[in-house]
Image (cartoon, rainbow, N blue to C red):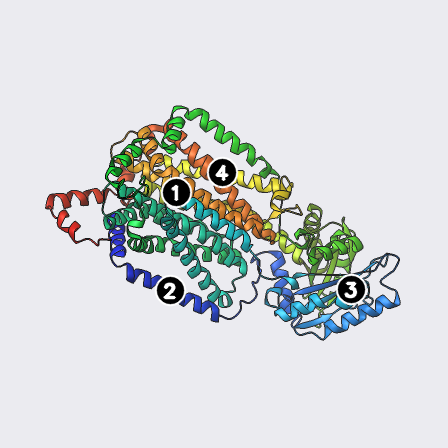
Amino acid sequence: MATFLYNLGRLAFRRRHFVALIWVALLTLAGVGAASAPAAGTTSFSIPGTEAQKAFDLLEQRFPGASADGATGRIVFKAPDGQKMTDADNKATVAKTVKELGGGTEVVSVTDPFTTNAVSKDGSVAYTSVKYEVPGMELADSTRESLEAAGDDARAAGLTVDVGGDALEAGAEPGAAGEIVGIAIAAVVLVITLGSIVAAGLPLLTAIIGVGIGVSTITVLAKALDLGDTTSTLALMIGLAVGIDYALFIVSRYRNELAEGRDREEAAGRATGTAGSAVVFAGLTVVIALAGLAVVNVPMLTKMGLAAAGTVVIAVLIALTMIPAMLGYAGRKIRPAGEKRKSSKEHTSSDAATSQKQSKPNMGTRWASFVIRRPVAVLVLGVVGLGAIALPATQLELGLPDDGSQPTSTTQRRAYDTLSEGFGPGFNGPLMIVVDAKDSDDPTAAFGDVADGIKGLKDVVTVTPPAPNKAGDTATITVIPNSKPSSTQTEDLVHAIRDKGSDFKAETDAEVLVTGTTAMNIDFSQKLNDALVPYLALVVGLAFLLLIVVFRSILVPLKAALGFLLSVLAALGAVVAVFQWGWFSGLIGVEETGPIMSMMPIFMVGVVFGLAMDYEVFLVTRMREAYVHGETPSQAVVTGFRHSARVVVAAAIIMMAVFGGFISSGESMIKMIGFGLAIAVFFDAFVVRMAIVPAVLALLGKKAWWLPKWLDRALPNVDVEGEGLRAHDERTKDSGSGSDEDRELVRV
């Protein structure tokens, strides 16, 4: 592989105009397609194989035209102190609002709070529900604006009015200001690491082009493939981070090759052949981890993973082709590693100064030497420290964010709080019971028996009368719990109703199913929990096999996998401490603590594993390269750190900055993902890869690189260390053709 990528890098360097034209054309094509693409439709939230989804599908079948998946909006009215919503003036104001809402487009129905008992017992709060034809993400902007403006007249009349419901659901804003800050930090780190603005600009430029192509392609396919805005946000987050990092590794290696005296085309080929090989395998681990989300069998999660994986593939291809091309354009503006810009008078003594600087131990060398001298202490401190941080993860509670997790400044949150105040906390999470009495001898009696049976359960406040369909074989019953939607009491109630369903089946031949947003969230969390172990086994297993091929070792990949588990558990512990327990939550703007987003554990496993393997591949391949070329295990560790530690640290800081930029998002899910990934990168790069990895390798010695001979013969030789390039050098030297080729190289 190293030889192939070496030739590819040299070709891209020589044919840089052609390579640049191809990528610019792809970016233009994707951009034009995105600009002319139809607006994305709904991101249907289906969970195949769950009871809640089965009930939802039954509703669509037995209640045709009822728009079971249609959005719902709520206008919540609160009377001024000393008044009641049942006062004549207030009733007239609400009636006017209801009439205006009923005349809107995409509206199926609007309820009158005074005829549906939607007034609180003390008369201070009332609400009207609006049902729409299409889901929230598919509503026209004008419809959403009409809903938000519906209460203006009521406000003018002195009522407090707020709007909630999924009808206000819109695209998640990732926090543009935070992204800009993240990219600015990345730019500063790149300048410090690569020594010039031009060299720093290349990773940023190529990463932005790659993300532009990836996100634009997602926009083009959004309508056809039912992709949501969160998909684009994830692709942007991952694509930008890995795009910068992959380019950084190749540009950094290019400068090292220049420092060894190679001409620029040869250095570009060498950088692509060596660092590029690591990029390919690092990218493969990320793709495996993201695409593996498909095993969860949740369509939304599968699409998010595949879209982000596609963006990573683009980042790898750009790093292998466009970076060498851009290096050709940059010419002498990118200087060898260790060389500073000098005037012509100073240029004569530059070689001696550079040689003296390179012989001086750098920070990576000093740190690796320290760890090798005290491996046990470093290992124990790292493992115990991360283990302590991971402890909160044992108290992990899962759920999905609702309006109760919105900032208090939003109308959705105020509507949520007002409804809780007037009707109780469970009112924001009603359960829908679907009774399928098609096989029952007396469906009407079966509906009544189910309703009466549920009334006797613990934590039930209200049970509405059954509402049968036209055929009379299916009915819906709404149950209001006594606890808020995300509480364990509400979850227990859902399980209690389902457990009692078997009794109803035996007594009435009617099947009882529980659905609704709250039940759907509970089923989603359970499905993700059940899928976590199989997913972990699949992803870690495939990556483990891949790393055996890369490192030709058993213990090094095993150590990499165990280190990843430690870092992801510590990151989950930090997420629980901040978002569930509220520790330091004010620093990142978490206004409401609560359960951790259901998909967070499995999502972090997928993304963090891929990113963790990036650092493992880039750091340890350089150690493997040194070991294969004759150094002792301890010397190889120091050599790997001398050449790679600075770049890996820079890459980690860049990733943390990019992910951290999303913490400023007003969307709680994006904020949590940004924080979780940023802290996970910190733990993995600075504790696991920078401390635990060299300590373990120092303790293992030669055993770290042991591989059974039969397995060594069976494995393909991918040549990540560039051994084929050394053979190429020998052949070139023996043939004596090197000087002729050098004279024909492109001079910049």
- Amino acid type, residue under disc 4 in the picture: Phe
- Amino acid type, residue under disc 3 in the picture: Arg
- Numbered mark located on residue 155 in the image: 3
**Quarter of the view holding residue 731:** top left
Q: Nearer the viewer, mark 2 or mark 1?
A: 1
Vertical order, 577 against 505 (above or below):
above
Q: Nearer the viewer, mark 3 or mark 1?
A: 1
Report the front residue among 538 and 338. 338
Among the two numbered marks 3 and 4 on one chain, the one whose residue lies closer to the N terminus: 3
- Amino acid type, residue under disc 1 in the picture: Thr
C-alpha span from label 3 to label 2 = 51 Å
C-alpha span from label 2 to label 4 = 37 Å
Q: Which residue is mark 4?
A: 683
C-alpha span from label 3 to label 1 = 57 Å
Q: Nearer the viewer, mark 3 or mark 4?
A: 3
Helix, strand, or loop for circle 2?
Answer: helix
Q: Nearer the viewer, mark 2 or mark 4?
A: 2
User: Badge 4 local density, few (<14 within 10 Å), some, or many (20+)?
Assistant: many
C-alpha span from label 2 to label 1 = 30 Å
Report the front residue among 663 and 131. 663
- Numbered mark located on residue 678 in the image: none
Q: Which residue is mark 1?
A: 193
Report the front residue among 525 and 182. 182
Q: Which residue is mark 2?
A: 26
User: Badge 3 local density, few (<14 within 10 Å), some, or many (20+)?
Assistant: some
